[in-house]
Amino acid sequence: MTVEPLWNTDHPPRQGLGLMRLRDTGDADADRDPAAVVHAALDLGINVLDTAEMYGNEELVGRTIAGRRDEVTLCTKFGVRWVGSEDFSVHADAASVVASCEGSLRRLGVDTIDLYYLHHRSEDTPIEETVTAMADLIDAGKIRAIGLSNVTEEDVRRAHAVHPVFAVQEQWSLTSRSVEPMLPTLAERDVVLVAHSPTGHGVLHRSTGTSLGAALADIADAHGVAAGTVALAWIHEQGRRRGQRILPLPGTTSVNHLRANVSAADLHLDDAQFDRLTSADPT
């Protein structure tokens, strides 16, 4: 069984946009207007937009892409629900998959979700049950491709045996490297790694008194860019050097920050810069 490509494989997207913090606060600042951020991304060729049932903003996302739906690779996630304000529960059984999908389609105001992720692995529901239900959604035309997030390498193997997985979304940055042992498994199955939080939830935008902080500052000065742009460029460089499908997914609520993030795709690090960043101690 093959996976329908979500984009032109000869010209894949270089970067996506994480929408976790997108909110309509009524702020008069045009730089932070949610519609302006999304439309600026589309105008700059960033058309992979990522949200989730858990984020509580699918209706807002739906409104921002209305009229431009055909330009968007629309991604959302299911299965995680807040329990109070601090904890969450996972719902990955077949009935929850169907109900969550219907809810997301309604809130987003679309007929099909391009990439639908299980947001977090379940300790209770076998991943085979979850993926079988997701595959049924493909057959029904509700979604186009299957994604997984916050899973193990073994989860990926078991899921992919049921139906091809298009993408796995995990945190990857200079301060979070735990996904790296999974990369060969993803490459073997031609699964895209979607690297969320590539600037360490914003930590790498700021100067720190560590060897990593010094490396980022020096390289940023050499290129005339911000430290966060260099940190994001490191993820792009990983994909180029590994010859692997890696899609960085920075999130922002600012048009100006968005433009800086987009510029990272064109920032090439030389061997010395790449190696210095890779080996630098972030603590």
Image: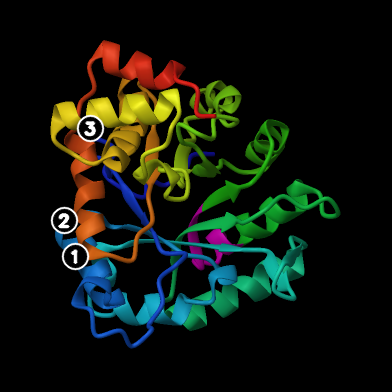
- What is the quadrant of residue 228 in the picture? top left
- Residue 20 pos. (x, y %): 47, 64
Instruction: Give amino acid for label 2.
Output: Leu
**Quick check: 213 above or below 57?**
above
**Earlier-in-chain disc, 3 versus 2:** 2
- Residue 252 pos. (x, y %): 35, 60
Asked if residue 25 lies left or right of residue 3, the reply is left
Q: Disc 2 marks which residue?
A: 44
> Does the stretch in magenta take in 143?
yes
Kindly tell me whether residue 230 is visible in this rendering.
yes
Q: Work out which residue is located at the far right of the displayed protein and give it.
A: 124
- Residue 272 pos. (x, y %): 28, 11
> Does the stretch in magenta take in 95?
no
Could you tell me how many numbered marks the image carries?
Answer: 3
Instruction: Give amino acid for label 1.
Output: Ala
Instruction: Give amino acid for label 3.
Output: Ala
**Quick check: 222 above or below 225?**
above
Rendered image: mark on residue 220:
3
Looking at the image, is mark 3 or mark 1 nearer the viewer?
3
**Earlier-in-chain disc, 3 versus 1:** 1
Rendered image: mark on residue 40:
1
**Quick check: 174 above or below 118?**
above
Q: Are marks 3 and 1 in contact (CB under 8 Å)?
A: no
Q: Alpha-carbon distance for marks 3 and 2?
A: 23 Å
Q: Quadrant of the N terminus?
A: top right
Q: Tell me the element at label 1.
A: helix
- Give the crowd class for mark 2: few <14, some 14-19, many >=20 residues within 10 Å: few
Q: Residue at left 62%, top 58%?
A: 134
- Bounds of the magenta segment: 137-145
- Give the crowd class for mark 3: few <14, some 14-19, many >=20 residues within 10 Å: some
Q: Tell me the element at label 3.
A: helix
- What is the quadrant of residue 283 in the picture? top right
